[in-house]
Amino acid sequence: MPTPKSQPEGGTGLATKTKGKAKLQPPSMWKVILHNDDYTTQDFVVLVLTVIFRKPESEATRIMLAVHHQGKGVAGLFTHDVAETKITQARALAEQHEYPLLCTMEPESVEA
């Protein structure tokens, strides 16, 4: 006896409801922070910001001055993995030039 078209071969006849597409949430973003120290030169901080974070020189200088005057500055806002990669690259470049540049990350605060 042939099975009805609504039931697959060997089916139970039970209908399953498919869920609607789940809404995708944008990934959480992380701020990469450069911290001031007494040894890393301002020129080197600008270099890091232009080479690693791809900032135009004028913006890199503004961020460097924030680091110098306020103790820290935001180098950029990235997804977690990208932020970690940028920090690793900045630390490697600083180590190569024998600077103790401190670079950290913190989650972007989400305001309701």
Image (cartoon, rainbow, N blue to C red):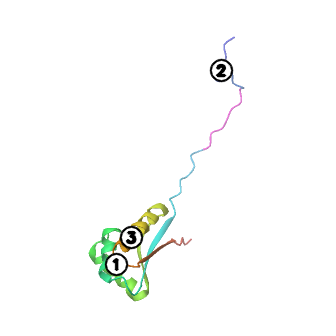
* Badge 1 element: helix
- Which badge, 3 or 2, comes first in the chain's sequence? 2
Span highlighted in magenta in the image: 13-19
Tell me whether the residue at label 3 lies in contact with that at label 1, contact meaning CB atoms closer than 8 angstroms.
Answer: no
Tag 2: Cα neighbours inside 10 Å, few (<14), some, or many (≥20)? Answer: few
- Which badge, 2 or 1, comes first in the chain's sequence? 2
Residue 10 numbered mark, or none = none
| Residue 23 % position (x, y) | 55, 52
* Residue underneath mark 3: 90
Amino acid type of the residue that numbered disc 1 sits on in the rendered structure: Val
Give how far apart the Cα atoms at labels 3 and 1 are.
Answer: 10 Å
| Residue 4 % position (x, y) | 66, 18
- Which badge, 3 or 1, comes first in the chain's sequence? 1
Q: Residue at x 36, y 79 (%)?
A: 63
* Badge 2 element: loop
Please check the rendered image and state whether residue 91 is part of the magenta-colored stretch, yes or no: no
Amino acid type of the residue that numbered disc 3 sits on in the rendered structure: Ala
Give how far apart the Cα atoms at labels 3 and 2 are.
Answer: 60 Å
* Residue underneath mark 2: 9
* Residue underneath mark 1: 45
Give how far apart the Cα atoms at labels 2 and 1 are.
Answer: 68 Å
Quick check: 14 left or right of 30? right
Amino acid type of the residue that numbered disc 2 sits on in the rendered structure: Glu
* Badge 3 element: helix
